[in-house]
Image (tube, rainbow, N blue to C red):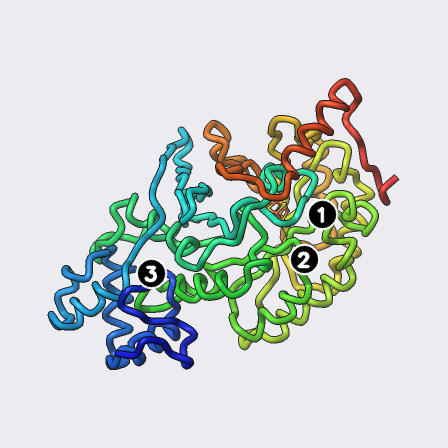
Amino acid sequence: MTSSTETTGIVIEPQAEKINLLGLSADKLERFFADIGEKRFRVQQVLKWIHQRGVTEFAAMTDLSKGLREKLGDLAEVRPPELVSQHDSKDGTRKWLVRTDGGECVEAVFIPEKDRGTLCVSSQIGCSLDCSFCATGKQGFNRNLSAAEIIGQVWVAVKSFGGFDERRDRVVTNVVMMGMGEPLMNFDNVVDAMGLMMHDCAYGLSKRRVTLSTAGVVPALDRLGDVTDVSLAISLHAPNNPLRNELVPINRKYPLEILLASARNYLHKLPDTHRKITIEYTLIDQVNDRPEHARELAQLLKELPCKINLIPFNPFPNSGYARVSGNALERFRDILYKQGYTVTVRSTRGDDIAAACGQLAGDFNDLTRRKARHEERYRRNENQPVRMVGFNGS
Ligand code: SF4
């Protein structure tokens, strides 16, 4: 046994903190086993025990030799995040609050539909961006989640459905990185976790069923196609830069034309053709829901192979925004239809357990003081009319 290694970057010392194997990608697990003098095929065995059978005790991994089980017990552990609470909505949506290392809590949500079950996973504790209409953004930021804490949400969800049983039909068929946080601000850990979601010896989901959603961290998006081929969603929410600067502040750094060029490049890097990007557009009453916005959006996206997902804004306390009206939603959708776009409207799910899109808030210490600033700003303006941002930011 080595006391440390330069090959993996993983320090292995008998007395050191144990390595949590839950979040190690297949490559990292292979290097871990190489470092302790074990063969490559151990990777498949251990991945299956952890992710397909839900086993956390090495003693129960019966196809490993006794000596290896003891060695693993000395060096490593399989430690999922602790389940704090589970809430079930009357519409079948299920939300989990899990405690991460350090005690902070994040949320994951499962949304059942007729032909699929989608798990929405968090990538950060809070969010390092500050989109003006997002409950998570208003809570501030604590830190990035580790790969173990990200894939651990999938592990907890599968377990909660009695999942680790090969004879049962799969309940979680899709994973979207759309929970708390901006996934591309936590690039390496998110890529490792998504790799496990798709690995045949772990969750075995197809690349079309794992989706990363980004608000537009362009340098990271430029790199993404070099390391993965998952589906991509862009949180757009506005058809022009002035309005998007207000709603999604990272747009000031990476404006729409740069973001959409990077999204097109991502598609070009994928080995298979006919892939489309999903454009997420949250419709907010009298902010970005006018016919002019729809027409401008249709024009903006005409060079991008995409489908558009319209999301009626889900109000939360102190948001200052209101849900789009039914008429405005239909009008907006019809304009896009007529321009030839595939348009879906996301139905609101899990509203009764605050699990609807944009409502996740977790329970954590905000290290940025953004939450306090938002609350103070709201207190100062509480008798003022809701601020409107109109067409072209007017
Ligand atoms: S919408 Fe996404 S990127 Fe923006 S603040 Fe919320 S979690 Fe962060």
Three-letter code for the amino acid on which mark 2 is drawn = Gly
Report if the beta carbon of the residue with label 2 is closer than 8 angstroms to ligand 1: no
Q: Earlier in the sequence, mark 3 or mark 1?
A: 3
Q: Does label 3 or label 2 sit earlier along the sequence?
A: 3
Q: Are marks 2 and 1 in contact (CB under 8 Å)?
A: yes
Q: Which residue is mark 2?
A: 216
Residue farthest to the right, as pictured: 394
User: Distance of mark 3 from mark 1, alpha carbons?
Assistant: 39 Å
114 or 233, which is in the foreground?
A: 233
Q: Nearer the viewer, mark 3 or mark 2?
A: 3
What amino acid is found at the position of numbered circle 3 in the picture? Glu
Q: Tag 3's secondary structure? A: loop
With 359 as the anchor, is 286 left or right in this view?
right
Q: For the residue labelled by badge 2, is the local secondary structure a helix, a strand or a loop?
A: loop
Of 327 and 103, which appears nearest the observer? 103
Q: Quadrant of residue 93?
A: top left
Can you identify the residue that label 3 sits on? Answer: 17
Q: Place residue 77 in its image quadrant.
A: bottom left
Image height of 48 relative to 91, above or below: below
Q: Which residue is mark 1?
A: 248
**How dense is the environment of label 3, judged by Cα within 10 Å: few (below 14), some, or many (20 and up)?**
few
* Badge 2: residue crowd in 10 Å (few <14, some 14–19, many ≥20): many
The disc at residue 175 is none
Query: Where residue 147 sits: x, y (%)?
Result: 43, 59
Q: Amino acid at mark 1?
A: Val
Q: Nearer the viewer, mark 3 or mark 1?
A: 3
Q: Is mark 1 within 8 Å of ligand 1?
A: yes
Of callouts 2 and 1, the N-terminal one = 2
Answer yes or no: do the residues labelled 3 and 2 have beta carbons within 8 Å? no
Q: Residue at x 72, y 34 (%)?
A: 328
